[in-house]
Image (spheres, rainbow, N blue to C red):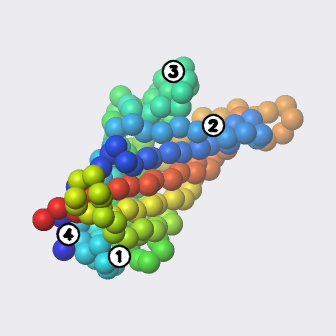
Amino acid sequence: MANLKFDPVHSTLEFGVKHLMVSKVKGTFTDYSVDVSGDIDDNNSLQSVLTINVDSIDTGNADRDNHLKSADFFNVDENKQIVFKTTKVSENSITGELTLAGQTHEETFNFKNHGVSDNPLSGGQVVGFSVSGKIDREKYGMNFNKPLETGGFLLGKEVEFEFDGEFAIEG
């Protein structure tokens, strides 16, 4: 069992949503934490909790960020956090309970354990994990949309995301 310390400086959490049926708008969350426990050599033993401060959403556009924080989407006044708690980890997938915009559903995502590396700057070791996947935002009550005259909708209902995390191995 390793004691892992999340390294937010060397980690990213990004997402993307189809816009006007022709492009993808991307963003990130800048304030989040991940607690991981278990044997890093045995994915089945891993347990984790990801906690995201929704107010830290950043799409590079303040007006869009404020709209995403509104009741049309995250409703940050009532739902300050997104939380994902794992229930099962295997070689290639991670399953858990995702709480988003006040609703909780089980989700399964792609998972990759990148293994251990020596850190020549700290003299210690690090381990890296990646999680990626898609969620249906409408399943979480995020139904805001507008039909387009040319067909389709303003926003896609599928949200793609990718998390790449680095953790210092302590002890």
Q: Is residue 112 visible?
A: yes
First of labels 4, 3 by sequence position: 4
Residue nearest the observer in this picture, 104 or 32: 32
Is residue 110 depicted above or below 166 in this figure?
below
Q: Amino acid at mark 2?
A: Val
Numbered badge on residue 62: 3
For the residues labelled 4 and 2, the Cα–Cα distance comes to 37 Å
> Residue 31, located in which quarter of the rendered image?
top left
Q: Position of residue 105 (x, y in %)?
A: 43, 58
Instruction: Give the foreground label among 4 and 3.
Output: 4
Check the image and name the residue furthest to the front: 120
Q: Which residue is mark 2?
A: 25
For the residues labelled 3 and 2, the Cα–Cα distance comes to 14 Å
Residue nearest the observer in this picture, 123 or 96: 123
> Residue 63, located in which quarter of the rendered image?
top right
Q: Is residue 63 left or right of residue 52?
A: right
Numbered badge on residue 43: 1
For the residues labelled 4 and 1, the Cα–Cα distance comes to 13 Å
Q: Amino acid at mark 3?
A: Ala
For the residues labelled 2 and 1, the Cα–Cα distance comes to 33 Å
Q: Which residue is mark 4?
A: 2
Q: Is residue 1 left or right of residue 115?
A: left
Residue at 29%, 57% in the rendered image: 120
Instruction: Give the foreground label among 4 and 2.
Output: 4
Residue nearest the observer in this picture, 1 or 53: 1
- Check whether the beta carbons of the residues at disc 4 and disc 2 lie within 8 A of each other: no
**Quarter of the rendering occupied by the N terminus:** bottom left
